[in-house]
Image (tube, grey):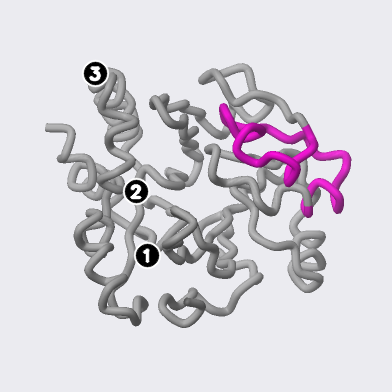
Amino acid sequence: MQDVCETYPPLNTLKPVADDIWIIDGPIIRFGPRWFKMPFPTRATIIRLPGGRLFIHSPTPLAAELKAAVIELGAPNWIIGPNRLHYWWIPEWHAAYPGARIFLAREITQQAGDRLTVEGEPLDRSSGYPWDQWIATLPVAGSYMTEVVFFHLPSRTLLLTDLIENFEAKRVRSPLMRLLTWIGGVRDPDGSTPRDMRLTFSRDRAAMKAAVARMIEWDPERIILAHGRWYDCNGRAELERAFRWLG
C-alpha cells in the first residue's frame, strides 16, 4: 500500500511558512483497523520563540540532515503530542534532545503503550504554559480523544492535526482510497473532520461549537494540517467551511 498515497517531497526538510514558522513533511503512516489501514502523509511544525526556543509540534522522523538544520534554528524546548494518535516519533526527538520538555494530550500514553515510555506533562488546560505569550492553547475534548489546538499569535498561524484532514485526489492513486476520502469528508478542496471522528466531538456539541468559534475569532491567516494539503491563506473562511457540519 506504500504507493497508493503520495507524500509532499522533499521530506525531512525544513520548509519556511512565515516568520519563525517551518513545516516538515514526513513519510506515510498507516492507521485504522488491522484488516484495512489507510495511508496518511505526515507533517510536523516548528515554531521559534524568542531566545531560539523551539516548539516542536507533532514531530516527524528526525533524520540526520534534519537534525543538523534544526540546530541552525535554535534548541528544541518543547515537544508536543497534540492528540492520542500523534506520538510515534516523540521518543526519537526526546532521545536527541533530553532537555526538552514533553507535553502530551490526554490518553497518548495509553494509546502508545511501550512505544512511549516518557510520561510527559499534561496538555489539559488553555493557559499556564511557558509559551503562553506567543502561542494560544485550546484543548478540544471529545469522547474518544482530545485534540489540542495551537495558535501562533505573531504570524496568525493555526495548528491542527485531525480536526481537519484534506487529502488531494491527485496524490491518492488508488480509486478505492479516493472514494473513501470522499465518503469520509476529507477530500480536498472540501477537507473537514473525518465523519467517523465527528461522533467523538458531537456528544458535547455546544463545547465543540464554542471551540470552533474561538478558532474563528482568532482569525487565522493560515492553517497547518498534519494530513494533506494545508491552507496558506483564508484561514478563517476555511474554518467556517470545514466545520459547517456542526450546523
Secondary element type, mark 3: helix
Task: Give coordinates of residue 213: x percent, y percent.
Answer: 26, 28
Which amino acid is tagged 1?
A: Arg
Residue 3 inside the magenta-drawn segment: no
**Label 3: how many residues lie within 10 Å, few (<14), some (14-19) or many (20+)?**
few
Give the residue displayed 54% in from the left and 18% down from the top.
125
Answer with left or right where residue 226 lies relative to residue 94. left
Location of residue 105 in the rendering, given as x and y in whole percent from the top left corner: 58, 31
Name the residue at 35% across, 49% down.
221
Residue 214, how many percent across, how many down?
32, 27
Give the structural element (helix, strand or loop) at label 2.
loop
Q: Which residues are magenta?
A: 92-118
Give the vertical position of 231 relative to 87 (above or below): below
Mark 1 → mark 2, Cα distance in angstroms: 10 Å
**Left or right: 121 in relation to 209:** right
Q: Is residue 104 above or below residue 173?
A: above
Q: Nearer the viewer, mark 3 or mark 1?
A: 3
Q: Are marks 3 and 2 in contact (CB under 8 Å)?
A: no
- Mark drawn on residue 229: 1
Q: Which residue is mark 3?
A: 206
Q: Give the residue type at disc 3.
A: Ala
Q: CA distance from mark 3 to mark 1?
A: 28 Å
